[in-house]
Structure formats: C-alpha cells, structure tokens
C-alpha cells in the first residue's frame, strides 16, 4: 500500500495508474486525488458533492477564505442577483429547494452568501475544501496520466482529473488608467469590497464605470457620500428591478410542482421559464408594442425584455425600437436633459451587453450631490494624488471606487499557468481566443474540464442551471470512464475547430458581435476579439451535450490500459439558422413532396410561398408577358431604385422543372436586384409533366432571346445579358448559356448558377451523404427527373449541361453549391469542368447550407454574406465587359 496523505486523499496503491476511484500511486506530490477542483463557488461546491457521491477522492482549492465565489467577493453596497432568486438557486437537492426561503425577488449578496454557506454546512463540504490557497500552475504528466498542481502555499498536488470551477466573472480586470497607484485616498474595487464594509459618509467619492456593479451600487453610495461623481465611458441599458416579495405568479408556478418547474428551466433558452415571443417587433402596431414593453418594464426582468419580441437580438430595426423605449424612460426620469442624453446608450444594440437591473439608478442623477462625467466628452488624463485629472478639469476625491469589471470567461482559467500534452500551454493554445469543445474541454489538455467555460451558454443564461448541467455532465463522464476502464479523455482538434466554428456561426446570426462588450473580450486591452459564450441557448446546448454522450462521446478520444477509443467528428455542421428552420419544419410533420401528385406539390409549394415575408423593396416591379417557344410566358421584372438604364439578368426559378413560380423565388430576386443594382427578369417556363423535356429549356432560351431584343424597352442596357437561376433554374441558365454560344447570340456575359442541376447521374457522393433530412432529398430528385425527362433524354446536354460536347467559350460563371445538398457534387463538377475548358469560373461552396438556403432570403441570416457574393458576381459580369 502507498501512503495515505492528507485528509480526503484516496487510499492509493503505487502500482495503479490506470483506473479511477480505486486510487493511484502517491507521487512526489504532497497529496493525490482522483479529482482536484479549483474554486468553491456554486460550481465547485456542487461538483464536490457529486464527486463524493461517486466515491471519488476530491479536493477543492479556493483562493477565498470561504465558499460562495462571486458572492464571497462582490460585497459592494447594493449587490444582488439579476435573475430571480427562486430561479437563481440550486435544484439538485429537493430538500434544500423546498426548505430555503428567499426573502426577496432578487436576494441581496449577504443572503446569497448565507445560502452558499448553508449548502456547505448541510452537505459538510468544507472538510474537502482548502481555503485561502491559490492554484498557480498545472502541468500534465504524460508518464502517470495525472495533473501536477502547484499551489500558493508551495505544495504540489496531483490528480487524475483537474476541473476549473474558477468562474466566468472572478478575475478583476487590471486597472488601465494612468496614475492609479499615485492616489493617496481610499481605493476600492466593487469586485473585492472589504468584508467590514466602507464608511462613505461625508466623503467625496468618485466611481469609475457604469456596468451592472456600478449601477447597483451608485444609488446607495450616493445616499451616503457627501458628493458622488460617476465617470461614465459607455452608458449602459438598465431596467428597474421592481424588487420586493417573490411575485405571486412565481409562487403559483412553484406550487404546481417544483420538480417540473426546475425541469422546464433546464430545457428553456436561458435557464429561466419565460414566455418566448414568436412575433416580430416590426409586425405589430406601435400601441401594442409599447404596451408590451411597458409590461416588461413594470413586471419583467432582463430575460423577458430580450424575449419580448422574437427579433430583438437579430434585427437592428427591431432592436432599435426597444433601445428607444429605454432611452425615453431615461429621458423621462432624469431632470437635466443634458445628463439624460449622456446616460442614453447609443453605440450598441440593447441586449448585446448584459442588461443591467437597478433600483433607482437613473433617479440618482436628480440628486444635488451627484454628478455625471461623460468620459467621451471629457476623457481622464490621469489619476493624481488627490483625485482625477480630466483633460479639461481637475477633480478631488477622498475615495475612488473602481467598478471596472472583469477579464471575463478566460481570465481566471489562463490565470493559472496550465501546460498540457507536449508542453503546450493553454495561453499558447488560446492566443487567438479560446478554443474549446462544448466549453468543457480543450484539445491537448487531457482530463482538464472547465465549468461554464468559453463556448458554453454560461453568462448568457441563469448560471445556476448552466453550472448544474456542466457539473452533471463532467461527473457522469468521469463515472463512465471509470466504468469503461478508461483513464483519459480529451477532445479531438477537429471537434474543437467544429465547435468554435459553430459558436461563431451562432454569434454571427445575432447582433451580439456588434458591441464592445466583455462577451467579445473587448473590455480588456489586447484580448482577442472573439464572442466567448454560446448563443444557441441552454436547451439546444443541453441537447447537443446529451447527443455527444449518446453518440459514444462524439469528438472525444479516450484512452486506457487496453488502448484508445477515438470517435472523431463534428457535432453541429449545419448553420444554426438552417438548423432552426429544419427543426421548425420537422415540427410541422409536413408530407414529402415525392408522395404527392404534381398538382398537389404545386399547391403545397404555392401555399408555402404565400406565407413568406417579402424580400427587400425594389424600385419597381412589373409583371408582363413574352413569347416563349410554344406560346406566351409570364415574366416579372424587378427594377432597382437607382436611375437606369441598368444591366439585365434573366432569372429562372427553381422547382425541379415541375413547380415554382415568380412568387417562390420573389424574395431572392428582390434581394439580388437591390444588391447588384441590376434589373432581374424572372421568367416562367412550361412545367412538367404537362410539358416535358425540352420544353423548359426551349422556353428559357426563347425568353432570353426576346429579352435581349427588348432590353432597351425594358429599361435595360442593350447588348449584354447575364443569366441566373436556382436549382432547376440553374440548370436552365447553364443550358441557355450553351445554346446562346452555339447560336451565336444573344451575348451572355455571365452565368450565376445557384445549386444547379447539371447532370442526371445519381452516383456522386452528395446524393448518398445528403440523401435525406435537408429538404431536397434524393427521392425527390428522382421524382423531378421522372416528371421531366425520359431516361434516354436525360443525358442530352439540354438536360444535363455537363455532358455538352465542349464547355469552351462559355460565359464566365459563378457556381454556388451547398454542403448539405444532394446536388452539391454535380455543381462542383460543373465548376471544375468549366475551368478545365478555360472558362473563368468561381465556385463558392457554402459551409453548413442546404439546397433551399439560397432563396430563403427572408429566413436565413447566415445566407447574407453568400447573397452579397452572388450580387458582387453579377456586378462583376457586367463591369468586366465594359468596353475599354
Ligand atoms: P465563482 O462564483 O466566480 O467562483 C469561482 C471561485 O474560484 C472564486 O471564489 C475564486 O476565488 C476561485 N478561483 C479562481 N481562480 C482560482 C485559483 N487559481 N485558485 C484558487 N481559487 C481560484 N449570474 C446569474 O446567473 N445571475 C445573477 O444574478 C448573477 N449576478 C452576478 C453578480 C455579480 C456581482 C457577479 C460578478 C456575477 C454575477 N453572476 C450572476 C455570475 C456569477 O458569477 C455566477 O452566477 C456564479 O456565481 C458563478 O459561480 P462559479 O462557481 O462558476 O464561479
Ligand atoms: P462591466 O459590465 O464590465 O462594467 C465595467 C464598467 O467599467 C464599464 O462601464 C466600463 O466602461 C468601465 N470601465 C472599464 N475600464 C474603464 C476605464 N479604463 N475607464 C473608464 N471606464 C472603464 O463590469 P461589472 O459592472 O462588474 O459587471 C460585469 C458582469 O457581472 C455583468 O455584466 C453581469 O453579468 C455580472 N454582474 C451582475 C450583477 C447583477 O445585477 N446581478 C451585478 C454586477 C455584475 P466601457 O463599457 O466603456 O468599457
């Protein structure tokens, strides 16, 4: 037997380095544990409880002198939670949940700290927590598969697993104002407020910062101090706490069943059950909108405010309406118009920085002893021995309070010198921003877990819910490794890259990246500008984490004495808004089109088109008729608002030659018209099965000829045309380009082929990989071809343009393909074939998109950059052909 060292150490056998729970050898370390946890906030406390329950030896190391984390350190006057206390509390212990009574809707810091202490007492946690000790470094020892930690008391601790429960908002931001150390008066940080409190009475106090901490403390400090000066660099949005007793509707909801209430929170978007609007702020009357805002202002909280309309965080126009509502509240509250205006945030969308919750913040600026200094107008030159020198004024203080925030989400993690496999440090690995898998682990750092790490919903949620979810996931993972006889786990680089991409993709469909927020790392000079939390929501995130486990730890490599289990892969590859669209469609249980007759499918497709929001406004829309190959065809012309004449693009809608109309592709045509500043003429053509091959191709060519001949009359620039089309329309645009070349006209200067059908061959990989689940299915493609062309006709270049005798001398092309589209590979093949034939071609493969993404102008924000490139290509077709 090895030596048993220290309280809480497991009984360690020297020969055992591969199993968990049964112990491991005592190394040169002072003590060895199955798991070391850094931090005794709510995360570390619950994790300790879970680990004990699994029979694992665990030690928590905490820099503070007691439990509570955030609520141990942040003792500034007015500190309280901004999520209602009945929600912002543990759910893992039903007895605790039933018996602990919160005194207020938003409990103050001392009460939350007492709660943490009560939990520690109830579960006898402190005996495994080493307080007043900081973990300084952690090094992975490959030979023993253990972490070696150095602590501030000079000791070494080893452990199989190492968990950073170090908090997202625990590392105060370093002061970045010149002269701070010269000030001779009292200096306090809200994040490190003295335990004994501070007497501000009769003192001249300056507060730097106007984030949540400042906004909570300013009203109380103002009531006590002789004078209070608030230094504001960026005004923040704050809403009233309306604090008081726990609201009756909360009590009613809890009375209906606490476990169900808690479970609903776990599966909600932000970890709190609130009503989620499915209405656009732009779709209701001003009266209705203001009534909703007022209701949230009076009775709601920050999560209700953000969710008051579905597009608050994605549509700048919708967001601005809520911004202006809050600004008007500020203007109505603050007596001095100049001060009121200075307090109005105007530089970022509401909700893209955490919304503040206050009690009397704006009213405080009506007090005679309070002054607001707008640092944008009067920047700080330096802090001096006696106060603060602005560029144009010197101010004297007895006390300066820094409410300047935190090095959020990564600060406390990289604050420990962590070295993983092969000498890689976490600081190096994260030099361009944090790279995690699920916000839980990083590649190259085996057995190192983070609780609410970057890349998880964490700070965008009720953190109690997110903390409990992570703790449970980690504890279950360690337990499973033990059960499987495995000793290490780490994510694969591909899984990490995929997750980082997904986190960015989510952020990019919101307005979040627009703010200089701590979510973006923008508050700390030199920190990489990366969106740190996961914006996909607690519910979706929980589903993903569960899926990873159910899929045999997808994206992880696990090792043990018997070898390794590597299940490489990326858990989410579809663009987040596409995923939402797919989920919404799945929820509707729609019939598949290939189970319908052509007439039914058309009716179905028309009904969907009728429900869609229109695309952007264009200058003019004209419906007309032109001669096709066998009778009249309708067209719809989209004219830009700018003065003409404009270049003309002939556009063919999608729909597998069977369905589709001007309406189905209307939003896309509008969007392309606006973005490219060209006329789009969307041409209808005869549909199969009534008019089979080659009717559509013949109509498309006839229409193009007529438009070329009538370009001037249509308001276009005669001479040059471009063609464009989506799906089967892309097929027609490609064929028209070939027919025009072969016929010696009309002159076509460019072809924009959007996820085109180019071949009748179903053997390409994308037909198998994307056969089902992404709207356009392989069976549906068979259905389309069967309606359109006999098998012997399908190989004709008039059906399969890739089969043309030669592709030389065709117009320059842009071909857009989507990753999750059965047609992906034939589009790519056409691009390659054109390039091989010497045709200038740009292939734009769209990551995470599906066949129907491109026309979904009204639904998909992730398509915006793609549509911008499509429009740029159209402009390029014409400018490249301007005579020298
Ligand atoms: P923390 O509570 O931050 O605990 C981490 C602990 O790790 C700290 O005690 C720290 O001392 C310790 N530590 C860090 N590094 C080391 C090291 N190297 N060695 C030893 N110990 C270390 N969230 C909400 O959801 N709702 C709210 O209302 C809310 N209000 C907040 C109010 C304030 C003032 C602040 C700052 C944050 C608030 N938050 C809120 C976020 C809050 O941080 C979390 O809700 C939660 O308390 C975090 O718990 P934690 O255990 O993960 O981290
Ligand atoms: P914060 O939101 O980052 O605010 C810091 C403030 O200091 C900002 O106004 C910032 O201005 C200002 N500042 C920083 N450096 C400055 C400088 N050099 N010169 C002038 N001003 C400077 O920090 P926080 O208020 O501590 O809040 C952090 C987070 O903790 C919150 O977002 C919230 O999640 C949590 N919190 C919650 C509550 C609650 O209500 N429960 C209370 C406190 C904190 P700029 O904006 O211009 O950078």
Image (cartoon, grey):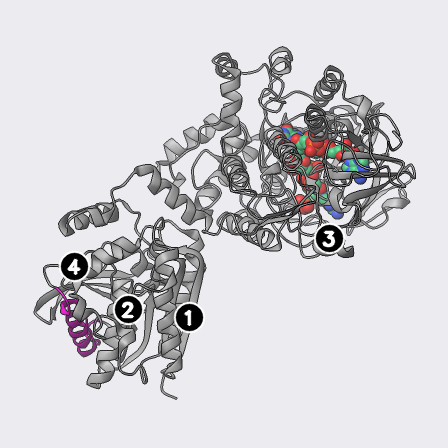
What's the distance in space between the residues labelled 1 and 4, CA to CA?
A: 29 Å
Which residue is at a point 26% across and 44% down the rendered structure image? 611
The question of residue 89 being in magenta is answered with no
What's the distance in space between the residues labelled 1 and 3, CA to CA?
A: 39 Å
What's the distance in space between the residues labelled 2 and 4, CA to CA?
A: 16 Å
Quarter of the N terminus within the rendering: top right
For the question of whether residue 645 can be seen, the reply is no
- Disc assigned to residue 843: 1
Q: Where is residue 641 in the image (x, y as percent from the top left)?
A: 32, 63
- Disc 2 designates what residue? 759
Q: What stretch is highlighted in magenta?
A: 692-714
**Nearer-N-terminus badge (1/3):** 3
From the viewer's perspective, tell me whether residue 730 is left or right of residue 17.
Answer: left
Q: SS class of the residue under badge 1?
A: strand
Marks 3 and 2 close (CB-CB < 8 Å): no
**Nearer-N-terminus badge (1/4):** 4
- Disc 3 designates what residue? 525
Mark 3 crowdedness (10 Å alpha carbons): few <14, some 14-19, many ≥20: few
């Amino acid at each position: 037997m090895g030596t048993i060292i220290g309280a809480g150490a497991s009984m360690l056998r020297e020969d055992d380095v591969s199993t968990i729970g049964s112990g491991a050898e005592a190394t040169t370390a002072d003590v060895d544990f199955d798991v070391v946890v850094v931090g005794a906030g709510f995360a570390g406390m619950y994790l300790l409880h879970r680990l004990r329950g699994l029979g694992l030896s665990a030690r928590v190391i905490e820099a503070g002198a007691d439990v509570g984390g955030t609520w141990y350190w942040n003792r500034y006057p007015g500190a309280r939670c901004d999520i209602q206390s009945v929600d912002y509390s543990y759910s893992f212990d039903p007895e605790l949940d039933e018996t602990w009574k919160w005194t207020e809707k938003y409990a103050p810091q001392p009460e939350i700290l007492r709660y943490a202490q009560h939990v520690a007492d109830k579960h006898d946690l402190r005996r495994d927590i080493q307080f007043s000790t900081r973990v300084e470094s952690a090094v992975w020892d490959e030979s023993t598969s253990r972490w070696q930690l150095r602590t501030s008391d000079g000791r070494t601790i080893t452990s199989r697993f190492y968990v950073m429960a170090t908090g997202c908002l625990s590392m105060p931001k370093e002061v970045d104002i010149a002269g701070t150390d010269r000030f001779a008066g009292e200096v306090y940080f809200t994040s490190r407020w003295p335990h004994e409190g501070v007497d501000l009475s009769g003192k001249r106090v300056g507060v730097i910062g106007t984030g949540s901490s400042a906004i909570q403390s300013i009203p109380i400090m103002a009531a006590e101090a002789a004078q209070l000066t608030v230094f504001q660099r960026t005004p923040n949005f704050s809403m009233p706490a309306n604090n008081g007793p726990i609201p009756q509707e909360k009590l009613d909801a809890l009375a209906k069943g606490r476990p169900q209430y808690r479970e609903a929170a776990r599966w909600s978007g932000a970890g709190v059950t609130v009503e989620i609007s499915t209405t656009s702020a732009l779709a209701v009357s001003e009266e209705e909108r203001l009534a909703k805002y007022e209701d949230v202002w009076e009775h709601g909280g920050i999560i209700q405010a953000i969710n008051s309309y579905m597009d608050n965080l994605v549509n700048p126009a919708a967001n601005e309406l809520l911004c202006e509502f809050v600004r008007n509240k500020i203007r109505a509250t603050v007596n001095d118009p100049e001060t009121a205006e200075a307090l109005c945030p105007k530089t970022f969308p509401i909700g893209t920085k955490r919304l503040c919750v206050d009690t009397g913040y704006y009213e405080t600026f009506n007090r005679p002893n309070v002054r607001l200094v707008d640092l944008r107008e009067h920047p700080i030159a330096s802090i001096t021995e006696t106060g603060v020198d602005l560029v144009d004024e010197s101010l004297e203080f007895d006390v300066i309070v820094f409410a300047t925030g935190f090095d959020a989400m990564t600060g406390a993690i990289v604050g420990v010198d962590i070295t993983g496999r092969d000498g890689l440090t976490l600081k190096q690995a994260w030099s361009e921003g944090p790279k995690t898998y699920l916000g839980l682990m990083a590649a190259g750092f085996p057995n190192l877990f983070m609780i609410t790490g970057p890349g998880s919903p964490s700070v965008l949620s009720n953190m109690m819910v997110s903390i409990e979810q992570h703790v449970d996931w980690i504890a279950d993972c360690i337990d499973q490794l033990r059960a499987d006889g495995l000793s290490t786990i780490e994510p694969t680089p591909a899984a990490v890259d995929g997750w980082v991409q997904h986190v960015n993709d989510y952020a990019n469909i919101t307005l979040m990246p627009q703010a200089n927020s701590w979510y973006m790392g923008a508050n700390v000079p030199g920190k990489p500008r990366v969106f740190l939390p996961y914006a996909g929501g607690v519910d979706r995130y929980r589903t993903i984490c569960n899926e990873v486990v159910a899929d045999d730890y997808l994206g992880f490599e696990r090792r043990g004495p018997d070898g390794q289990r590597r299940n490489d892969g990326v858990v989410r590859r579809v663009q987040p808004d596409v995923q939402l669209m797919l989920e919404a469609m799945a929820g509707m249980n729609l019939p598949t089109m290939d189970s319908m007759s052509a007439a039914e499918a058309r009716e179905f497709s028309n009904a969907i088109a009728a429900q869609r929001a229109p695309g952007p406004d264009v200058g003019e829309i004209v419906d007309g008729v032109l001669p096709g190959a066998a009778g009249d065809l309708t067209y719809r012309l989209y004219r830009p608002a700018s003065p003409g004449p404009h270049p003309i693009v002939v556009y063919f809608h999608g729909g597998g030659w069977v369905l589709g109309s001007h309406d189905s592709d209307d939003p896309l045509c509008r969007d392309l018209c606006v973005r490219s500043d060209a006329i789009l003429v969307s041409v209808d053509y005869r549909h199969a099965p009534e008019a089979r091959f080659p009717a559509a191709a013949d109509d498309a060519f006839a229409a193009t000829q007529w438009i070329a001949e009538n370009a001037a009359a249509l308001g276009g620039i005669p001479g040059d045309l471009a063609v464009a089309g989506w799906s089967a329309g892309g097929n027609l645009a490609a064929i028209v380009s070939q027919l025009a070349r072969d016929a010696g006209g009309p002159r076509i200067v460019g072809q924009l082929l959007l996820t085109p059908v180019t071949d009748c061959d179903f053997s390409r990989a994308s037909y198998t990989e994307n056969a089902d689940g992404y709207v356009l299915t392989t069976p549906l493609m068979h259905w389309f071809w069967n309606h359109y062309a006999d098998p012997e006709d399908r190989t004709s270049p008039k059906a399969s343009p890739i089969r043309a005798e030669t592709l030389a001398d065709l117009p320059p092309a842009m071909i857009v393909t989507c990753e999750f589209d059965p047609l992906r590979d034939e589009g790519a093949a056409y691009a390659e074939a054109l390039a091989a034939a010497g045709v200038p071609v740009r292939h734009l493969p769209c990551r995470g998109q599906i066949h129907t993404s491109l026309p979904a102008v009204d639904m998909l924000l992730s398509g915006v950059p793609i549509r911008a490139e499509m429009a740029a290509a159209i402009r390029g077709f014409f400018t490249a052909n301007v005579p020298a």
